[in-house]
Image (tube, rainbow, N blue to C red):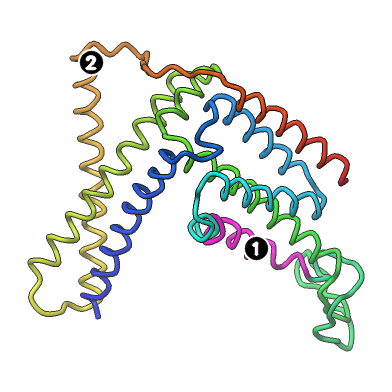
Amino acid sequence: MASDFVVKTLDETTRAIEQSIFANRFARKDGFLQRLDPRFKLVGVLCLILLTGFSGNLKTLLFLYVLTLGFAIASKVPLGFFVKRVWIFIPIFSAMIVFPAIFNVITPGAPLWTLVTFSSSHTVGPFVIPKTLAITKQGVMGALILVMRVATSVSFAVLLIVTTEWIKVLKAMAVLKVPEVVILVLAMTYRYIHLFLRTVEAMLLAKKSRQVGDTNIKEAHGWIASRLGVLVGKSYNLSSEVHLAMLSRGWSDNPRLIEDFTVGYLDWFWVALTAGIIAVCFTLR
């Protein structure tokens, strides 16, 4: 039903807003990562992400991924929430992309599972389909490494975001000499994503409250497309109004963040722990 389509869209939008707000609650808990200085945490997580990106060993990647689960538990982040937030989108999408690489058409190697045996080999464009089409050990291993690399990198990034308030992440970036204009754009983007989600929710709720009976799916799709156009117009007008308001209040391209950070013993422990993790990963190669 078309009305079900609109209601489902409304529910998904509301869930996205609630999930974002719920994730912010973890940053206020008294967990391991929450007690770290955001500057040390940001640098440490970036080092671990780089380590993950350069690692080509499945054992190393599994070790790092298990570490992310341990950090989540120590930081009082529910594992169900953490795992779903990581695996639902990016790693699954990566797995879909890398799926063709498991076949010997793309990655020659020792066959693990023979699928089809043809009378002869065939050429399709730049690819040569061998006489025996099979899934190879090298292809499967390469696919697993890529998926685990993406999942582990995303896990570290999610841990950083859900255990640190966004304004503190921006402050840490400023201390690390990230250009101020980049910080300002990120700050406003984060703030106005929430605003536009609320705007979309209000549009859909108004539509539902004024709807009598059902409309066909074509009309529902047309209404959604027209609301997207309205949202683009609202965003353009709002950006102009916000810029003029900032100029009228004396904005001079220099964002100011008022919170100061303090370094404690736990931060130096984090430095030592990160160095130890890197050393262990090099021994697993």
Q: Measuring 26% from the left and 68% from the top, which residue is drawn there?
A: 221
Dot 2 crowding, Cα within 10 Å, few <14, some 14–19, many 20+ = few
How many numbered marks, from 0 up? 2
Question: Could you tell whether 90 is left or right of 50 in the image?
Answer: left
Rendered view: 19 above or below 253: below
Q: Is residue 233 magenta?
A: no
Q: What residue does disc 2 label? A: 247
Q: Measuring 41% from the left and 38% from the top, which residue is drawn there?
A: 28
Q: Measuring 76% from the left and 41% from the top, which residue is drawn there?
A: 54
Residue 58 disc label? none
Residues 19 and 216: in front is: 19
**Upstream in sequence: badge 1 or badge 2:** 1
Give the residue type that dot 1 points to: Ala
Q: Secondary structure at mark 1?
A: helix
Q: Main secondary structure of the magenta part?
A: helix
Q: Quadrant of residue 41?
A: top right
Q: Are marks 1 and 2 in contact (CB under 8 Å)?
A: no
Q: What residue does disc 1 label? A: 95
Q: Secondary structure at mark 2?
A: helix
Question: Could you tell whether 56 is left or right of 241 in the image?
Answer: right
Task: Report the magenta residues as a range.
Answer: 86-102
